[in-house]
Image (cartoon, rainbow, N blue to C red):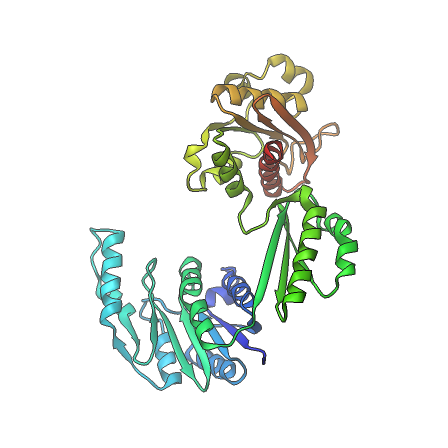
Amino acid sequence: MSEISAELISIGNELLAGYTVNTNVTFISQQLKDIGISVKWITTIADEPDEIFDALQKANQRANIVMTTGGLGQTPDDITKATICTYFDTKLHQSHSVLKDLKKFIHDRNRSEKFLEINRGQALVPVDAQIISNPIGTAPGLILKRDGSWFSFMPGVPREMKAMVTNHFIPFLKTKFDLPKIKTEIMRTTGVPESKLYDILKAEIEAYPQFPVAFLPKQIGVDMRFRLMVTDSGIEKNWHGFIERIRIKAQKYIFTNDERNIEQVMVEMLSSKKLTLAIVESFTGGLIQDWITDVPGSSAIYNGGIVTYSNESKVEFTEVSQETLQKFGAVSEQTALEMVRGIQKRFNSDCAISTTGIAGPDGGSKEKPVGLCFVAARYKEKEFVRQFNFGTERRINKMRGAMTGMEMLRRLLV
């Protein structure tokens, strides 16, 4: 089976200027890799006809698949579709189906919004193109073929692009190419640095060099990704055995074996156990509550929470004693425990999380340096408090504190 190659082309002056981070190529590359297609080239170009034409021509000469994002807006200076027509020797026409969908989308988005003449330009598509519908935006995607290579053109808005890739283009490619059988696994960990995690797993990894492991460190944890191109049932069986040995050794740090984030795991775990949660935060500033309430269905498990930045609010809302604050200070194990007990009582919840610390970059002392924090979790009468120092960067401290609070509660519940 010959290798199938792909090139990604991103169109946008804002990308070249550095005003926008190009997350689209990361997502598309991962999606293609998971079905056995290798991205060999990634090209970023300006919104210029010659640049677009040259990029399409070069990609056509070397790639089986060319996926382009950006440049499909409705502004008068948008020249991408005109250049597409030049390259594919076709012309634009108004698609009645796209126009109908466009009018419905604008009406449903805002019933008082008028359909403007400028909107009509979105319904102009190349005559020879297959249309990819866009239920969450105004610009449709396009599929064309030239000299044996397949081209897709999609809007640069990430959520619109992701829907098109997942729901349309990946299934389309599966019908056009004889793709290899790919197996993938993921383990998401937290509370362990990449170097320590590798050291824990080193013996297994070195014993099975034919099964590579990708370590993907993030600010709040390390993902491990496993990928196998299946050639026979024997190798697949051995691979699954290797995965299981890795899972057993790293089990302490794994919070999920799929793509879910910690807040999704937390909400689903509490829902399945019919438990409720309350949260009180100081240095994390409501971040845990923000993450939890981002999850659909969180209202079934989340009773409520408070951000108690001042000592007075800690006393008033979570019944932290003045004596504790005077003797140990706001950033202490004792205060974190009184906070978690107080919030559990106030909201009559089964579970609770509290955070208190010095987020930085200033405000610390020799005894209590920047980054020092205490995080507590409580399940009924069972409680757990730990001291951490995540460093001097404020945002990282908040993120790691929020992640740690949820992970500590998860460990209490398993």
> Residue at the location (64% across, 42% down)?
393
Looking at the image, residue 153 lies above or below residue 110: below
In the image, taking residue 160 as reference, residue 250 lies left or right, namely right
Quarter of the image for residue 213 reads bottom right
Numbered circles on residues, count: 0
Of all residues, the one furthest to the front in this rendering is 234
Which corner quadrant holds the N terminus? bottom right
Furthest residue to the top? 323
Corner quadrant of residue 407: top right
Q: Measuring from the top left, give residue 92's x and y in whole percent.
A: 29, 79
Q: Position of residue 297 (x, y in %)?
A: 42, 39
In the image, taking residue 251 as reference, residue 274 lies left or right, namely left
Q: Residue at x 68, y 19 (%)?
A: 328
Query: What residue lies at 44% left-to-right and 61% top-to-bottom?
Result: 162
Residue 298 % position (x, y): 44, 37
- 209 displayed left or right of 266: right
**Residue 96 versus residue 193 in the image, above or below:** below
Q: Residue at x 29, y 68 (%)?
A: 122
The one nearer the camera, 383 or 318, is 383
The quadrant in which the C terminus is found is top right
Whether residue 80 is situated above or below residue 166 in the rendered picture: below
Residue 380 location (% of width, % of height): 56, 23
